[in-house]
């Protein structure tokens, strides 16, 4: 008795169908990997924004119609000088509207960092 082996041949159409399915699967995997990285970056940027908000709220005190905030402003001049000024602001509220606003800051911090030409321009306005 003779044993014959039957060789199974795969048709070209079957190979094409398999190739298209494998390509679709590869595109899906790459897309999921990219989406995961994008989502991580998006979450990180949201966390950074929340940290900034937390610093603002940490420097805020409110009681009744008075709100006190602590913050900084960075001033830049076109000649390259800059200064960061710490501020305390007090707002008085009535009926949900600000009716008075005070800012407290150290003038010497500004004057020590400001360019001479700017100080001269400011002084001209007061003469």
Image (tube, rainbow, N blue to C red):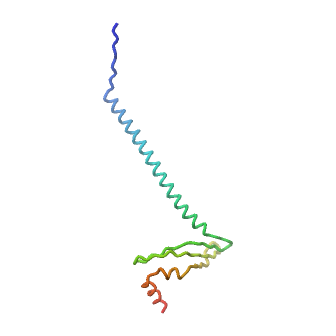
Query: Which residue of the protein is positioned furthest toward the front in this rendering?
Result: 112
Considering every residue shown, the one lying at the far bottom of the view is 127
* Residue at (34% x, 6% y) in the render: 1
Of the pair 18 and 81, the residue shown nearer to us? 81
Q: Residue furthest right?
A: 64
* Residue 16, quarter of the rendered image: top left
For the point 64% across and 74% down, the residue is 93
105 is higher (above) or lower (below) than 23: below
Which residue is drawn at the image coordinates 34% and 17% (left, top)? 6
**Image point (50%, 56%), residue name:** 44
Specify the quadrant of the image occupied by residue 26.
top left
Task: Note whether 16 is above or below 78 in the view shown.
Answer: above
Q: Is residue 86 left or right of residue 82?
A: right
Q: Percent from the top left, x then y, of residue 65?
A: 66, 74
- Is residue 4 shown left or right of residue 56? left
Where residue 79 sits in the image (x, y, percent)?
A: 40, 78
Relative horizontal placement of residue 116, taking residue 61 as reference (left or right): left
How far across and down, in percent of the image, does residue 8 sit? 34, 21
Q: Residue furthest left?
A: 12
| Residue 114 falls left or right of residue 66 | left
Camera-side residue: 121 or 62? 121
Placement of 94 over or under 4, stated as above or below: below
Q: Between 66 and 75, which is closer to the camera in this rendering?
A: 75
Number of marks drawn: 0
């Amino acid at each position: 008795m003779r044993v014959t082996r039957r060789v199974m041949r795969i048709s070209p159409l079957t190979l094409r169908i398999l190739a298209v399915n494998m390509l679709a699967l590869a595109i899906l995997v790459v897309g999921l990997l990219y989406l995961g990285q994008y989502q991580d970056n998006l979450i990180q940027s949201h966390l950074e924004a929340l940290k900034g908000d937390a610093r603002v709220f940490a420097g805020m005190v409110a009681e009744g119609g008075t709100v006190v905030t602590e913050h900084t402003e960075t001033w830049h001049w076109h000649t390259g000088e800059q200064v960061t000024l710490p501020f305390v602001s007090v707002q008085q509220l009535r009926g949900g509207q600000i009716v008075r606003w005070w800012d407290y800051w150290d003038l010497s911090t500004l004057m020590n960092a400001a360019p001479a030409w700017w100080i001269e321009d400011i002084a001209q306005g007061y003469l």
